Image (tube, rainbow, N blue to C red):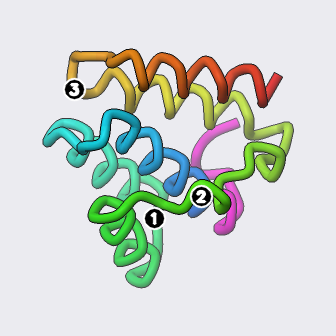
Amino acid sequence: MKLSHLEHSDRLRLMKFVCAFAWADLEIADQERSFITKMAKQLHLTGDDHKQVKAWMELPPKVEELDPNEIPREHRKIFLEVARDLVAADGAVTEEERENLALLEQLLG
């Protein structure tokens, strides 16, 4: 499955998770910010969606808004791949990022 095949709600959900992962070490590195911006463009988000993504880069999404069970089974591999790519974007994977990624992998099965 390609990113272009995701429904609008799933594209926005993916960006919410990506932004949350970027905040794992309590700051978003320039490389992570660049990754998020490029990803938002690849997903062809609307203007309002881009504003939401920018807001998530200023303040992380609320934890209660991040339910991995809401990720459709057929998209879980994509979410994991993008999360891995984001975590590696700045060239330094922190312990927090490793733990969050391991948790997401467990929850998505």
Mark 3 belongs to which amino acid?
A: Asp
- 3 vs 2, front mark: 3
Identify the magenta region.
1-10
Residue 3 vs residue 105: left or right? left
Q: Residues within 10 Å of mark 3 (few under 14, many from 20)?
A: some
C-alpha separation, residue under disc 1 versus residue under disc 2: 9 Å
Identity of the residue drawn at 78% across and 29% down: 108
Task: Report the magenta stretch's main SS.
Answer: helix
Mark 2 belongs to which amino acid?
A: Arg
In the image, residue 102 lies at what x, y percent? 61, 18
6 is within the stretch colored magenta:
yes
In the image, residue 10 lies at what x, y percent? 68, 58
Question: Mark 3 = which residue?
Answer: 90
C-alpha separation, residue under disc 3 versus residue under disc 2: 22 Å
Question: What secondary structure is found at the residue carrying circle 3?
Answer: loop
Residue 91 position by quadrant: top left
